[in-house]
Image (spheres, rainbow, N blue to C red):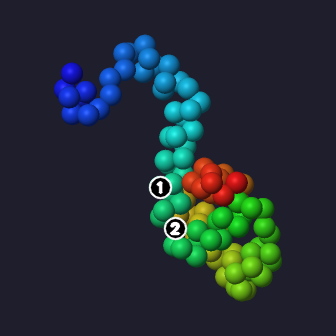
Amino acid sequence: MHAVAAGGAFFSPAISRKLLGSRVVTRFIEQDEAGRRFARLTPREQEVLLLIGEGLSNPEIAGRLFLSEGTVKAHITSILRTTGARNRVEAALIAAHARPDRW
């Protein structure tokens, strides 16, 4: 009652279990976590990550952002370290979950 009185919502334990097991809730959790990881990046790293998510290669990213390939590689190294992603594919998934409106 206190939660509802404070403007919150109440779900029975049975409904709560169904919601927590649903793909919709899982997707929101994934988006929230990806959003936090994405937000830790610098604006330039976010740009690079979004281009990785679009499937661009290092030379293509360099051309698009007017950077050297070495600078792109340095940004990718930082992106992987900051987000905890193990590789470009995992980084691309973070981009997709953080910015689903882009795809």
Q: In this figure, which residue is indicated by the disc labeled 2? A: 41
Q: Secondary structure at mark 2?
A: loop
Write down the quadrant of residue 24 in the picture: top right
Q: In this figure, which residue is indicated by the disc labeled 1? A: 36
Three-letter residue code for mark 2 = Leu
Q: Secondary structure at mark 1?
A: helix
In depth, the one of 30 and 86 nearer the eye is 30
In depth, the one of 68 and 44 nearer the eye is 44
- Residue 63 percent across, percent down from the top left: 77, 82
In depth, the one of 99 and 92 nearer the eye is 99
User: Relative to residue 57, is residue 3 depicted above or below?
Assistant: above
- The answer to whether residue 76 is left or right of residue 4 is right
Q: Residue at x 53, y 64 (%)?
A: 82
Q: Residue at x 70, y 54 (%)?
A: 103
- The answer to whether residue 40 is left or right of residue 101 is left
- The answer to whether residue 92 is left or right of residue 98 is right
Q: Residue at x 24, y 28 (%)?
A: 3
- The answer to whether residue 31 is left or right of residue 77 is left
Q: Can you see residue 68? A: yes
- Residue 45 percent across, percent down from the top left: 59, 72
Q: Can you see residue 77? A: no
> How many residues crowd around disc 2 within 10 Å: few (fewer than 14), some, or many (20 or more)?
some
User: Relative to residue 47, is residue 83 depicted above or below?
Assistant: above
> How many residues crowd around disc 1 within 10 Å: few (fewer than 14), some, or many (20 or more)?
some
Three-letter residue code for mark 1 = Arg
2 and 1 marks in contact (CB < 8 Å): no
| Mark identifier at residue 63 | none
Of the numbered discs 2 and 1, the one sitting upstream in the chain is: 1
- Residue 11 percent across, percent down from the top left: 37, 20
- Residue 56 percent across, percent down from the top left: 78, 67
Q: Residue at x 54, y 73 (%)?
A: 43
Write down the quadrant of residue 9 in the picture: top left
